Amino acid sequence: MDSIKPCVFIIDVDGVMTTGHFLYTAEGKVMKIFGPDDNDGLSLLKRDIEIRFITGDKKGFPITKKRIVDDMNFPLDVVSTIRRVDWIRGRYPLEKVIYMGDGIFDHYVMREVCYSIAPANADKLAKQHAHYVTERSGGDRAVAEACLHIMAKFFTPFNPSELPSAHGKLSGEWAV
Amino acid sequence: MDSIKPCVFIIDVDGVMTTGHFLYTAEGKVMKIFGPDDNDGLSLLKRDIEIRFITGDKKGFPITKKRIVDDMNFPLDVVSTIRRVDWIRGRYPLEKVIYMGDGIFDHYVMREVCYSIAPANADKLAKQHAHYVTERSGGDRAVAEACLHIMAKFFTPFNPSELPSAHGKLSGEWAV
Amino acid sequence: MDSIKPCVFIIDVDGVMTTGHFLYTAEGKVMKIFGPDDNDGLSLLKRDIEIRFITGDKKGFPITKKRIVDDMNFPLDVVSTIRRVDWIRGRYPLEKVIYMGDGIFDHYVMREVCYSIAPANADKLAKQHAHYVTERSGGDRAVAEACLHIMAKFFTPFNPSELPSAHGKLSGEWAV
Amino acid sequence: MDSIKPCVFIIDVDGVMTTGHFLYTAEGKVMKIFGPDDNDGLSLLKRDIEIRFITGDKKGFPITKKRIVDDMNFPLDVVSTIRRVDWIRGRYPLEKVIYMGDGIFDHYVMREVCYSIAPANADKLAKQHAHYVTERSGGDRAVAEACLHIMAKFFTPFNPSELPSAHGKLSGEWAV
């Protein structure tokens, strides 16, 4: 466990919480593909650290908002990748920020924050700049894996023998 | 063939019968991705053992119900992963239960039942706790493979030379 | 090139022309995923041999028909996998039939016909019984590859230096 | 850096900008799957070279047009693969054309132009004829990778340390 305690986990949505795909009909960008376990992993980690999402996708924002805000109850802001460092600096000390992203410009953010994570299917530059690359891809448990990794590295490791409900209210995908 | 005869095969739906993906529009979780052969594999196994499904996904329940109950004619219950052991114990002797699951909390169930199976793409903990990990992934024949595995291990192995209709009515995906 | 000249290429649809996935909404099986190059490969092969499709999927038949019959102009019949051998025998000499399938019961057909092909992602039994397993999967050029393989093995190999239009009307995906 | 300066980058859409899949309902070809970073990679490259798209897919044209023309602001023409060389020759000197394609007939174009690129998941012939095969597949950053490759080979390599906005207006997926 490290001595530095990060205070926020900021997560890019497309390609991290999703497979990165945009499903188009003749009407436009209508669908995105989210995956299993990420919401449950976040429900474990949120006892330890603030969690919020940012997205650069304005056209797909209603889809992203439906999943992240309405169904998962996390805050979500629209921030262009190339303006993210300034946006984050205005809200948090950069040395206490964990960032997870996958895209061609996400390394601009990764090199400024305290700790950065990329999913297995991320852009090459993003993976080169990340402190940790998950074994799983976006939309295939990458965020769940990142959550357990953050718990083990900065807080208390997840104990697989203990039912999560023992720790308080669980509010993930399958919460009661 | 083992001497213990399990009496029920309980199958988690998302990530096992599906790819684990949730397809979202701005209206919410609207689509799931099921795969080939699973319904046919189950139609072979159901001569030997009771088969039922459980899901923790309340928002996606109408999609799951359409496939599992309406189109495949199997029973389906909504049970949160972290309450599954109690739910199962109230209905079956745990030492006669086979469970198949893929998620971050499914090992809580796996360690209590007689025999457990995880698909190839399951969470790491689920795969570590499973007695058998299929070569195929969820939504890509994992359940069909599990069915043939259960037949070979606990009942009579599937005989590829004999037409399944010879054994009685077949009611899988392609049934007449 | 072999001396036997097959007279028909019979192709199973789901998992061969598609990825095998069934996309479900709360309304049921609404979508299937077809792939690139297959229609173009078939447009080359159809000069040499009759081509037709069979499917066991009654609930998804309108989707399959739209792609195979309306958009690609090939004949399509609904025939349960376990009745396919009889159905084929009533129409063609089995020793002149090439069959391509991917499913758990397709080996019943494969062992009776002259030549059989399975896509890379097929069921294990189907691949064990196939004379040829394509490198590509269903919905990812498996049928296009099978077409070039059949041309090379039984007819005249595709000549990559010659524009296909030189041979007559092309009617594939991208036909003019 | 080579001495030859190409003047246009012509990109096939299906299987290059998309996964190659056609999602069908009973109404027909209704959806295609686009991917991350490609629009951003193109926004970097377009300072150096003209960029345009061609497609052979008439039935899926409204979907393609929505993404390429309406959302990404690039020109798009319908040109059958087997007529593409003539179409290109009528507009550009072939020795100054870079072409990216993935299909069974794309090698007819590739062998005539100055430089050709195929995505990792392309047809075997296309990959054999391409000067460069991307590590990533269509709909999974293949075009973004191609853009950085073209910049490095023919123009000025992308400098990961410099914010792209420093070079002028950025108009990719996540542009402000």
Image (spheres, coloured by chain):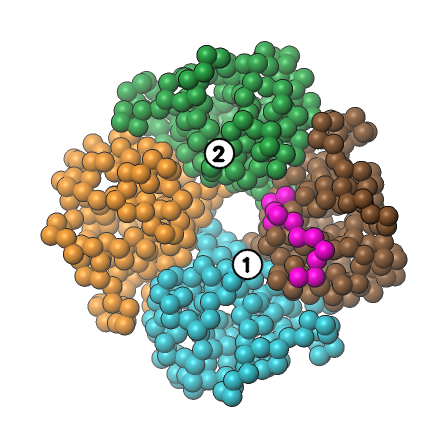
Chain colours: A orange, B cyan, C brown, D green
* Residue D134, disc: 2
Q: Which amino acid, mark 2?
A: Thr
Q: Secondary structure at mark 2?
A: loop
Q: Quadrant of residue A168?
A: bottom left
Which residue lies at the image location 33% right of the left edge and 50% below the top edge? A134
Instruction: Nearest to the eye among marks 1 and 2: give it.
Output: 2
In percent of width and height, residue A105 lies at 32, 32
Quarter of the image containing the C terminus of chain A?
bottom left
Q: Which amino acid, mark 1?
A: Asp
Q: Residue furthest bottom?
A: B3
| Chain of the residue where label 2 is placed in the rendered structure | D
Q: Quadrant of residue B174?
A: bottom right
Q: Nearer the viewer, residue D31 or D56?
A: D56
Q: Is residue D142 above or below residue A45?
A: above
Instruction: Read off the magenta span.
Output: C128-141
Q: Nearer the viewer, residue A165 or D115?
A: D115
Around disc 1, counting alpha carbons within 10 Å, would you say few (fewer than 14), some (14 to 19), or many (20 or more)? many
* Residue B120, disc: none
Q: Is residue C111 left or right of residue A119?
A: right
- Residue under numbered circle 1: B140
Q: Is residue C136 highlighted in magenta?
A: yes
In percent of width and height, residue D17 lies at 51, 33
Q: Nearer the viewer, residue D62 or C130?
A: C130
In percent of width and height, residue D59 lies at 65, 34
Q: Is residue C86 highlighted in magenta?
A: no
Q: Secondary structure at mark 1?
A: loop
